[in-house]
Image (cartoon, rainbow, N blue to C red):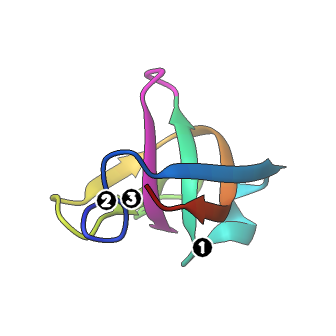
Amino acid sequence: MYPAYRDGDILFYGEHEPPKELIGREVVVKLETDEMYVKTLEVGSKPGYFSLNSHNATPIRDVKIVWASRVRYVAKA
């Protein structure tokens, strides 16, 4: 998620939380496809689906999330 995070930055994240409680926050998410991302979590177009936004990439729309965790701290490189 450049420019917010750069190569070598270390992200620390918390316990898994219900995705509905993390809307609008930067999170680490794992999708049903086993992909993991650091994105801003948004509501999807259907119940149980979410969209993932980034500073530098096209949004990922309407995905199912296995787990989500709030980014707690970033140790800059």
Q: Which residue is mark 2?
A: 1
Of the residues shown, which amino acid type is indicated by label 1? Ile
The residue segment tinted magenta is 32-42
Mark positioned earlier in the residue sequence (2 or 1): 2
Point out residue 31 in the picture as x, y percentages from the top left corner.
Answer: 50, 33
Q: Nearer the viewer, mark 2 or mark 3?
A: 2
Cα distance in 3D space between marks 1 and 3: 10 Å
Taking the image as shown, residue 71 lies to the left or right of residue 50, namely right
**In the image, residue 22 lies in the stretch drawn in magenta:** no
Query: Looking at the image, do the residues carrying marks 2 and 1 touch, with CB atoms under 8 Å apart?
Result: no
Of the residues shown, which amino acid type is indicated by label 3? Leu
Q: Quadrant of residue 67?
A: top right
Mark positioned earlier in the residue sequence (2 or 3): 2
Cα distance in 3D space between marks 2 and 1: 17 Å
Taking the image as shown, residue 5 lies to the left or right of residue 68, namely left
Residue at screen point 67% across, 68% down: 22
- Against 12, residue 41 (above or below) is below
Point out residue 62 in the picture as x, y percentages from the top left corner.
Answer: 38, 51
Residue at screen point 39% across, 45% down: 8
- Against 3, residue 17 (above or below) is above
Taking the image as shown, residue 16 lies to the left or right of residue 22, namely right
Q: Which residue is mark 1?
A: 23
Q: Which residue is mark 3?
A: 52
> Dot 3 lies on which element?
strand
**How busy is the neighbourhood of tag 1: few (under 14 within 10 Å), some, or many (20 plus)?**
some
